[in-house]
Image (cartoon, grey):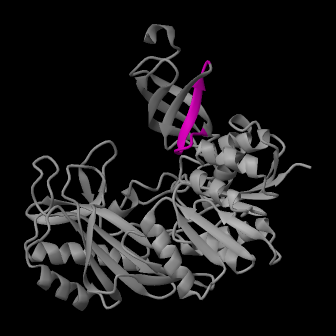
Amino acid sequence: MSKTLPVQKNDYIDVEFEDLTHDGAGVAKVDGYPIFVQGGLPGEKANIKVIKVNKGYGVGRMVQLLERSYFRIDIAQEEKHKFGGCQLEHISYEGQMKFKENQVRQVLTRIGKLENVTVHPVLGMEHTWQYRNKAQVPVGEKDGKLISGFFKPRSHEIVDTKESLIQLPEVNQAIQAVKEICSELGVKAYNEETHKGDLRHIMARYGKQTGELMVVIITRTNDFPNRNSIVEEIVARLPKVKSIVHNVNSKRTNVIIGDKTKVLWGSEVIYDYIGDVKFAISALSFYQVNPDQTKVLYDKALEYAGLNGNETVIDAYCGIGTISLFLAQKAKKVYGVEIVKEAIEDATRNAELNEISNAEFAVGKAEDIIPKWYDEGITADVLVVDPPRKGCDEALLQTIVEMKPAKIVYVSCNPGTLARDLRILEDGGYETLEVQPVDMFPQTTHVECVAKLVLKK
């Protein structure tokens, strides 16, 4: 196969990078054949070694950087900078913003065939480190002690890490304290090969506005050594802790969270605010990990909804009610639907917590529930969707097209599926007026977007 390609494995070649992939690798081309190289930036020249060739593309490793990009910054080599999640930390924040805006434009054009949609510059953050309010880290053993951190790329070898630079300090502190306490008190790490040992993961959640901390200990077993002493030590060492939860995952699986959860100490939930709306967050709740930028994202969704107090709004993937309750402050009535029963219980509780009486929630698939509402005479003036990364269910998109709400606000965590779904909605009679990217995850390749659509006259 490789004889017909312009490069072969183990070749050393000089290249110039033209672009970045969606996961932050530099893209160089040799006679039109793309080669992906981690660490390369557009405009840079480098000598690379070709380490893999396929029919459609190759993969290279940087050997020597020959010309630097204006946007490249030097990163220290400490262990804390080797955290696997920061694909763009070698790019200045200005460069990251340009990359993300360009990424959104490209997928809208390539996948959605939407060439004339206004894409605004990315709404970024002032402080681009220490923003995540939640971490869940795997636990292992080395030299008789517990270690925790992240997996080396393409392996299950844990790199012991004392801090991640994108986590809030309180989250890093909690993870380290729980690891040290469990190690001191004889808890054994889970071994995925032998399916023995106790401690699988440690999770920490922090309410940035309230200062409340939750610790979740995830084990293979229903019990673990010195449990009461561990709880006492956590309370003593972490004065902000309000909740200590035990989750049991007894299965041979890569899934982190198991089916059984019980509170060992304190409250079942901690609280946090997005704007003026208060949220109860349990161990299993989905809650945005960057609350500062979530406020920016939801403010933009509220602006695009353009509510004057007379509208009925349907939130088709409402989760624990985060967007629904934001919209309920300005709408006449909000209906939220979500397939996860526990999330709807959280949403109902959050509505009560905020004394919001014009929000109503239902469990089920949006494509099943919304037509029932339609039959009951409930129609949306504004429909909001905030689906998972795979985008909207095709049946839901068809339901939206048939219902014909005057306005759609699409909140997306994946520009590729956003572009795909916008194309379907455009073909169903809608016009995409504008898209606003929001940087929820600095130092990474992820970007969220809010899109505003209106029904064509």
Q: Relative to residue 255, is residue 129 drawn left or right?
A: right
Residue at the right extreme?
457
Q: Which residues are magenta?
A: 20-31
State the residue in front, 45 or 189: 189
Residue 11 position, x and y percent, is 43, 21
Q: Which quadrant holds residue 420?
A: top right
Q: Which residue occupies 51% across, 13% down?
A: 5
Seen from this angle, which residue lies furthest top? Answer: 3
In the depicted structure, whether residue 349 falls above or below residue 156: below
In the rendered image, the vertical position of residue 114 relative to residue 34, given as above or below: below
Q: Position of residue 169 (x, y in %)?
A: 40, 77
- Against 10, residue 320 (above or below) is below
- Which sits in the foreground, 165 or 233? 233
Q: Is residue 394 left or right of residue 402?
A: left
Q: Residue at x 68, y 48 (%)?
A: 399
Report if residue 401 is visible in the image. Answer: yes
Total numbered labels = 0
Name the side, left or right, on which 117 lies relative to 122: right
Horizontal relation, residue 133 to residue 228: left or right = right
Q: Nearer the viewer, residue 313 or 161?
A: 313
The quarter of the picture where the N terminus appears is: top left
The question of residue 22 being in magenta is answered with yes
Give the residue drawn at x 30%, y 49%.
152
Residue 139 falls in image quadrant: bottom left
Residue 286 visible, this angle: no
**Residue 353 position in % (x across, y down):** 53, 87
Residue 96 location, x and y as percent?
61, 55
Snapshot quadrant of residue 155: top left
Q: Residue furthest front?
A: 376
Magenta stretch contains residue 115: no
